[in-house]
Amino acid sequence: MNRNTHEEERRKVEKATSMERLGWIELLVSIGTLDVEDTIY
């Protein structure tokens, strides 16, 4: 039972970090597209 809760906690942490990573990727992509638009115009 104790190990099961530990697995659950780890899964939560992994999910949070993956969501965080997605947020960073989206942020970088939006910044990158802004830079590209600035260069084009």
Image (spheres, rainbow, N blue to C red):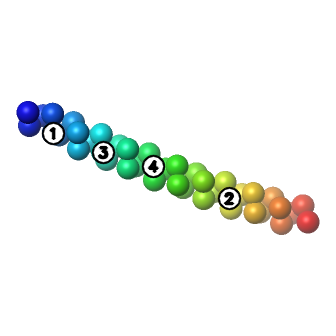
Of the 4 image quadrants, the one containing the C terminus is bottom right
The crowding category of the residue bearing disc 4, from other C-alpha atoms within 10 Å (few below 14, some 14 to 19, many at least 20), is: few
Q: In which quarter of the image is residue 9?
A: top left
The kind of residue tagged 2 is Ser
Marks 1 and 2 sit apart, C-alpha to C-alpha, by: 38 Å
Marks 4 and 3 sit apart, C-alpha to C-alpha, by: 11 Å
Please tell me which of labels 1 and 4 falls first in the chain.
1
On the picture, is 18 further left or further right than 9?
right
Please tell me which of labels 3 and 1 falls first in the chain.
1
Tag 4 and tag 3, C-beta contact below 8 Å: no
Whether 15 is drawn above or below 35: the answer is above
Disc assigned to residue 36? none
Q: Mark 1 points at which residue?
A: 5
Please tell me which of labels 2 and 4 falls first in the chain.
4
Q: Name the residue under label 3.
A: 12
Q: Residue at x 12, y 34 (%)?
A: 3
Of the 4 image quadrants, the one containing the N terminus is top left
Q: Which residue is drawn at 37% across and 44% down?
A: 15
The crowding category of the residue bearing disc 3, from other C-alpha atoms within 10 Å (few below 14, some 14 to 19, many at least 20), is: few
Please tell me which of labels 2 and 3 falls first in the chain.
3
Whether 19 is drawn above or below 39: the answer is above
The kind of residue tagged 1 is Thr
On the picture, is 10 further left or further right than 32?
left
Please tell me which of labels 1 and 2 falls first in the chain.
1
Expressed as whole percent of the image width and height from the top left, the position of residue 29 reads 66, 54
SS at circle 3: helix
Q: Name the residue under label 4.
A: 19
